[in-house]
């Protein structure tokens, strides 16, 4: 059974600092997603990673995927308060024909001024 | 292009009652997936509908059921509500079963 773990669960950062969120998954997958969720809101798609070594960047966020290590990272550069939210990674089982995404527990990011 | 819309946004029901939640998929999408997100947790897959047929189901009891209509909109029905069914219910649409999922704003269900 596919399991997804994220760490840390909670991250308090100062503005301007860098940090990385880690997402480990237990079995082979061919699709990994990163989402952002603001309190009481829905999920906003950030990145879709489809192949080993994939790296995508948007603003202060950069995501990468290592399928051999079954690890994805979300790197935050020079954090700003607007990045405060909960971040989820989600993994689709390899070869699956559905969007039965398995989500991690989420990382609550709080950026302090 | 319209996004994924869900209704209602909030709902309060009594234990034992039945509830129907609705989802309109994004224009051009033919697949709808439903997720349950309890407070402080990640979303959990309930089931997916593709071309009006159930196409995959998570670990949810049969009292969770669904429908998809010819216009690809969908309903989630929950019978015999329990307190633990209180959660944010998210609908996601995609083009094909494995296409990228785009989520609606969710329905917050509270069971008292």
Image (tube, rainbow, N blue to C red):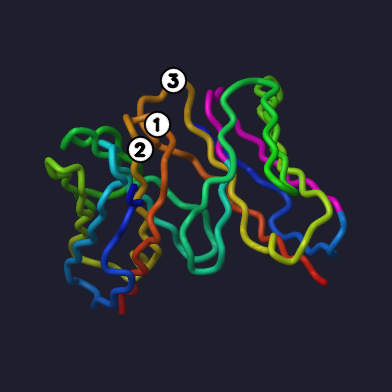
Q: CA distance from mark 2 to mark 3?
A: 17 Å
Whether tag 1 and tag 2 are in contact, CB under 8 A, the answer is: yes
Residues in magenta, as a range: A18-33
- Give SS at disc 1: loop
Identify whether B78 is placed above or below A57.
below
In the depicted structure, whether residue A10 falls above or below residue B108: above
> Label 2: which residue?
B94
The residue most toward the left is B70
What residue is shown with label 3?
A95
The residue located at (52%, 52%) in the rendering is: A44
Q: Position of residue A90 (x, y in %)?
A: 54, 41
**x and y percent of residue B17 in the render?**
17, 71
Q: Earlier in the sequence, mark 1 or mark 2?
A: 2
For residue A96: magenta? no
Relative to A106, is B70 on the left or the right?
left
B75 vs B27, nearest the viewer: B27
B19 vs B101, nearest the viewer: B101
Question: Residue B99 got which mark?
Answer: 1
């Amino acid at each position: 059974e596919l399991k997804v773990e994220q760490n840390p669960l909670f991250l308090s950062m100062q503005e301007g600092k860098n940090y990385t969120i880690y997402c480990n998954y237990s079995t082979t997958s061919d699709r990994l997603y990163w989402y952002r969720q603001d309190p009481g809101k829905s999920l906003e798609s950030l990145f879709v990673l489809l192949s080993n070594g994939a790296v995508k960047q948007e603003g202060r966020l950069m995501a990468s995927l290592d399928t051999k290590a079954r690890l994805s990272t979300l790197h935050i550069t020079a954090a700003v308060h607007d990045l405060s939210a909960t971040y989820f990674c989600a993994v689709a089982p390899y070869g699956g024909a559905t969007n039965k995404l398995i989500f991690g527990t989420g990382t609550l990011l709080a950026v302090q001024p | 292009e319209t996004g994924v819309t869900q209704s209602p946004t909030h709902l309060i029901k009594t234990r034992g009652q039945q509830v129907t939640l609705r989802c309109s998929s994004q224009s051009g999408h033919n697949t709808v997936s439903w997720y349950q997100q309890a407070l402080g947790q990640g979303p959990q897959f309930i089931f997916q509908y593709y071309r009006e047929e159930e196409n995959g189901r998570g670990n949810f009891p049969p009292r969770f059921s669904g429908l998809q209509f010819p216009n690809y909109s969908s309903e989630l029905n929950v019978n015999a509500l329990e307190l633990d069914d209180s959660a944010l219910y998210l609908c996601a649409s995609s083009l094909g079963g494995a296409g990228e999922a785009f989520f609606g704003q969710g329905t917050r269900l509270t069971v008292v």
